Image (spheres, rainbow, N blue to C red):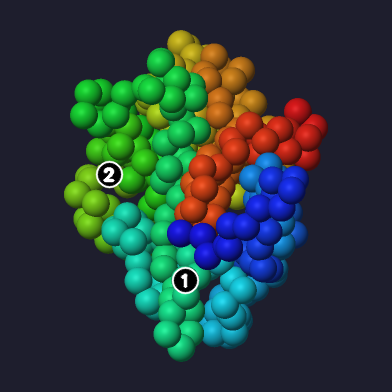
Amino acid sequence: MSRAVDQRSASGQVQDAVRRAAVLGHPVAHSLSPTLHRAAYEALGLTGWEYDAVDVTSGHLAGFVRDLDPSWVGLSLTMPLKKTVLPMLDHVEPLADVVGAVNTVLVQAGGGRPVLVGANTDVYGIVAALQEMLPGGTAAGSAADVTRTGAIIGAGATASSTLAALAQLGCTAPVVYVRSLGRIGSLMRAAHRMGVEPRYALLDRAAEEIVSADLVVSTVPAHAADGLAAELADAAAAGGVRGVLLDVVYESRPTALSRAWAAAGGAVVGGERMLLHQAVEQVRLMTGRIAPVEAMERALGERLGV
């Protein structure tokens, strides 16, 4: 809920005291979150609202959070802070708790200090982005009426959110491909909390198998899946691919994996679509207002040159 004072000037704009929000991460200079949130504030007529990008490492996050004052309304968190922040919060929303990753912190008025509430809008962003390419668009099927096969590349915080998102889209037993099976402990615990049953496999087996998946989500950084992209060309030669690929990378687009998937006949969703949709939900949570999707989408397109 927004703490802004809703007083309107002759022009109809909301007159607010300064309200602050920011995206935190390391590195974070590449983030497009300021573009999206600032466009939303402008379209909503929220004067006095600020949104910045602040480079914060895991080791400095506690100090940053401790110094938040009542002017703050929220934080967007990117890597590597989505799990680090958990013990610093006063309350964690159920979805974020189950997923084990927080990408949104709501700063609410408290007695002596702000109350920090952790939420997860990545799941919403992933679902909305994938649905854009599914039959029926954003009204496409859910877990209640469709069963789908899926694959996830990577095992970090975004992979945990992807497990929840795929479950909502009817895929409760995806295959998770990783470079090392020794690094899946956190994801396995998240899967257990969600009640989903993924299978885990090494990345070098992915090319032959993902060609038949309905939904594929790559959660790894730019170029981390370049090897898979090269292998995919051979694996897809026989009959192409049939599913939808979401590559969460948005700063180096299109990725080699996206190009290879499209060349094999598959549908591709860029990471900027996930970014847009998760920011739409963040704006709603931080301001208490329905986000102006078209204005945010337009600003993102202008920034990316599309």
Point out residue 159 in the picture as x, y percentages from the top left corner.
42, 50
**Residue type marked 1:** Gln
Q: Residues within 10 Å of mark 1 (few under 14, many from 20)?
A: some
Q: In this rendering, is residue 152 above or below 170?
A: below
* Residue shown at the point (58%, 63%) measured from the top left: 5
Q: Residue furthest top?
A: 239
Q: Is residue 256 visible?
A: no
Q: Is residue 113 visible?
A: yes
Answer left or right for 233 relative to 153.
right
Mark 2 and mark 1: Cα distance apart in space: 36 Å
Residue under label 1, please give it. 108
Identify the mark at residue 198; answer none if there is no mark: 2
* Residue shown at the point (41%, 68%) measured from the top left: 117
Point out residue 29 in the picture as x, y percentages from the top left corner.
75, 59
Q: Quadrant of residue 67?
A: bottom right
Answer left or right for 262 relative to 86.
right
Q: Quadrant of residue 287?
A: bottom right
Q: Residues within 10 Å of mark 2 (few under 14, many from 20)?
A: many
Identify the image quadrant of the C terminus.
top right
Q: Residue furthest front?
A: 10
Disc 2 on helix, strand or loop? Answer: loop
* Residue shown at the point (68%, 59%) measured from the top left: 15
Point out residue 6 in the picture as x, y percentages from the top left corner.
58, 57
**Tags 2 and 1 touching, CB below 8 Å:** no
Q: Quadrant of residue 215?
A: top left
* Residue shown at the point (75%, 45%) measured from the top left: 11
Q: In this rendering, is residue 253 above or below 261?
A: below
Disc 1 on helix, strand or loop? Answer: strand
Earlier along the polypeptide chain: callout 2 or callout 1?
1
**Residue type marked 2:** Pro
Q: In this rendering, is residue 200 above or below 135?
A: below
